[in-house]
Image (cartoon, grey):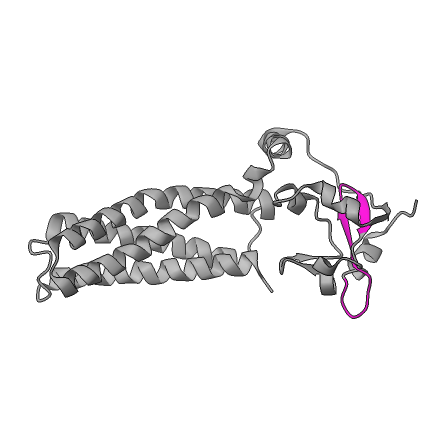
């Protein structure tokens, strides 16, 4: 059976008429004939010409889908695997439970994203309708969003470490910065709302305006974080 070199793998990316091949667990598969790999791109995120062992481990389907395409050879890397230390223990766990390699952060991060954006909507609606109950609902939603944000940040750091080796990336760097700024802004908003506001619906009170600036600003940051997350998931 043919042994593929790294150069042969990388040149078979399905672009400009090149064949589309992928590597999974050191086995090389030709996916050129698959309609789901048109142009060497699968689901707008997986590019041919790469080792997709990690990706398929956290995909919604298993390795059995590769039985539908032709295995054309093998590819053996010279990379040495560290079998000691905490990283090795984590990798061993993820090998048995691939769900935790990519899914915990996306599963968790949607809670603060949705809640913190909803808080802004409820606060504006409360002032517009002079509804104290709506304002109270906005405050509770903001509080829950604040409580869920540290978990989202922690899982984000874990995903960055385990999938990107904590290497610097412009998008990830911007997401990290915005996440901490969001946490600070929501914290300031809650302190302002809890301890400084007397009339929660009096728009002439400058403290209410400061509170609204905090709330609306964090929603803008949250929207940007969601957009950047989408760029990482679907970079094309």
Name the residue rendered at 65%, 41% in the picture.
57
Say above or below: 226 vs 99: below
Name the residue rendered at 61%, 45% in the picture.
60
User: Is residue 156 shown to the viewer in this render?
Assistant: no
Residue 80 place in picture, x, y as percent:
74, 38
User: Is residue 73 shown to the viewer in this render?
Assistant: yes
Residue 133 place in picture, x, y as percent:
14, 51
* Front position in the image: 196 or 21: 21
Q: What residue range appears in magenta?
A: 14-29
Residue 104 sits inside the magenta stretch = no
Say above or below: 118 vs 151: below
Q: Is residue 63 left or right of residue 104?
A: right
Name the residue rendered at 37%, 58% in the picture.
222
Residue 215 place in picture, x, y as percent:
25, 58
Quadrant, the C terminus:
bottom right
Say above or below: 84 vs 32: above
């Amino acid at each position: 059976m043919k042994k593929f070199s790294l150069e042969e793998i990388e040149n078979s990316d399905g672009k400009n008429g090149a064949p589309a091949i992928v590597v999974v667990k050191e086995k090389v598969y030709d996916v050129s004939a698959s309609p789901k790999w048109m142009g060497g791109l699968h689901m707008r995120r997986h590019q041919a010409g790469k080792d997709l062992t990690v990706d398929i481990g956290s995909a919604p389907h298993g390795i059995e889908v590769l039985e539908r395409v032709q295995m054309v050879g093998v590819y053996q890397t010279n990379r040495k695997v560290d079998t000691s230390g905490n990283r090795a223990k984590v990798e061993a766990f993820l090998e048995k439970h691939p769900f935790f390699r990519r899914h915990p952060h996306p599963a968790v991060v949607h809670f603060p994203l949705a809640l913190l954006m909803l808080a802004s909507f409820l606060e504006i609606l409360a002032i517009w309708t002079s509804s104290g109950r709506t304002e109270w609902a906005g405050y509770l939603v903001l509080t829950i969003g604040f409580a869920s944000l540290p978990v989202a940040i922690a899982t984000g750091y874990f995903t960055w470490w385990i999938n990107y080796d904590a290497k610097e990336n412009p998008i990830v760097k911007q997401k990290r910065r915005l996440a901490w700024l969001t946490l600070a802004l929501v914290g300031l908003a809650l302190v302002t709302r809890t301890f400084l506001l007397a009339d929660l619906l009096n728009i002439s009170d400058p403290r209410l305006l400061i509170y609204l600036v905090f709330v609306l600003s964090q929603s803008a940051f949250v929207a940007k974080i969601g957009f950047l997350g989408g760029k990482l998931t679907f970079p094309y």
